């Protein structure tokens, strides 16, 4: 089995080295290969220069957007390049722990799962502010009501898919609404989302967190829109 690790990046100069090194160093189950696909989404803060330096000593694919298009666009670019059997989305902000990879991959290896989500609410959460926790609860509730699901963490960034499932979804979103679009289209096609507990340590806007209330509104709208459209 081969896993493609998609890392969408925008203005993460202070974290990009560490995230890529952690991803490359994390041990995987026997006979699981990995490829790392980094998509620089028009960064302006030195991220591009740091990636160029890393390319000389570390093996990963480095793709770029000439302008900032959004997380969804970066993920879709990574999907086009990916050659693995499984794809995992890895944010470049150190909120998620790459050491959870073996746990996330286990359902694919043991039970032939098609989609796996890493659930923060089944695992350990640190420093999540009330407004973000509330937004996550509401997104979970909305997804479960609209799609008859029973997931605990719709908005998790740790989403893993068999490649044939992912490439059948005809993804359109350019920004953070890629997450609810993925959830909506997977559930509409009848795929069961397996959840496993993960570790999560939230960061603040001062530390570089980019998602805001407009993105939450967009996520709710995406869940509703894709319930009735393709």
Image (spheres, rainbow, N blue to C red):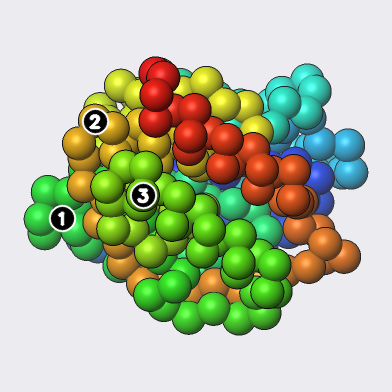
Mark 3 or 2: in front is 3
Quarter where residue 200 is shown: bottom right
Q: Name which of mark 3 and mark 2 comes first in the sequence.
A: 3
Q: Is residue 54 left or right of residue 91?
A: right
Q: Residue at x 38, y 64 (%)?
A: 152
Mark 1 or 3: in front is 3
Q: Which mark is residue 109?
A: 1
Q: Residue at x 51, y 64 (%)?
A: 137
* Quadrant containing the C terminus in the rendered view: top left
Confirm whether residue 168 shows in the render. yes
Q: Name which of mark 1 and mark 3 comes first in the sequence.
A: 1
Mark 1 or 2: in front is 2
Q: Which residue is mark 2?
A: 189
The one nearer the camera, 194 or 142, is: 142
- Residue 151 x, y percent position in the rendering: 33, 58
- Report the Cα–Cα distance between label 3 and label 2: 16 Å
The one nearer the camera, 173 or 79, is: 173
């Amino acid at each position: 089995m081969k896993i493609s690790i998609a890392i969408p990046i925008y203005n993460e100069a202070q974290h990009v080295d560490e995230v890529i090194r952690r991803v490359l160093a994390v041990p995987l189950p026997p006979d699981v290969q990995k490829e790392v696909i980094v998509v620089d989404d028009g960064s302006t803060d030195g991220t591009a220069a740091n990636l160029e330096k890393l390319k000389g000593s570390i093996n990963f694919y480095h793709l770029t957007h000439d302008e900032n298009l959004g997380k969804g666009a970066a993920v879709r670019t990574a999907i086009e390049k990916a050659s693995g059997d499984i794809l995992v989305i890895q944010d470049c902000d150190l909120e998620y722990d790459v050491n959870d990879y073996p746990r996330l991959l286990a359902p694919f290896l043991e039970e032939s799962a098609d989609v796996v989500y890493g659930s923060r609410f089944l695992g350990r959460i640190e420093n999540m502010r009330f407004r973000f926790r509330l937004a996550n609860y509401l997104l979970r509730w909305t997804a479960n009501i609209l799609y008859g699901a029973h997931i605990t963490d719709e908005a998790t960034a740790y989403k893993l898919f068999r490649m044939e499932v992912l490439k059948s979804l005809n993804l359109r979103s350019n920004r953070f609404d890629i997450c609810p679009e993925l959830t909506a289209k997977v559930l509409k096609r009848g795929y069961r989302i397996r959840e496993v507990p993960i570790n999560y340590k939230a960061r603040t806007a001062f530390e570089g967190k980019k998602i805001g209330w407009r993105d939450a509104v967009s996520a709710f709208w995406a869940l509703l829109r894709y319930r009735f459209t393709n």
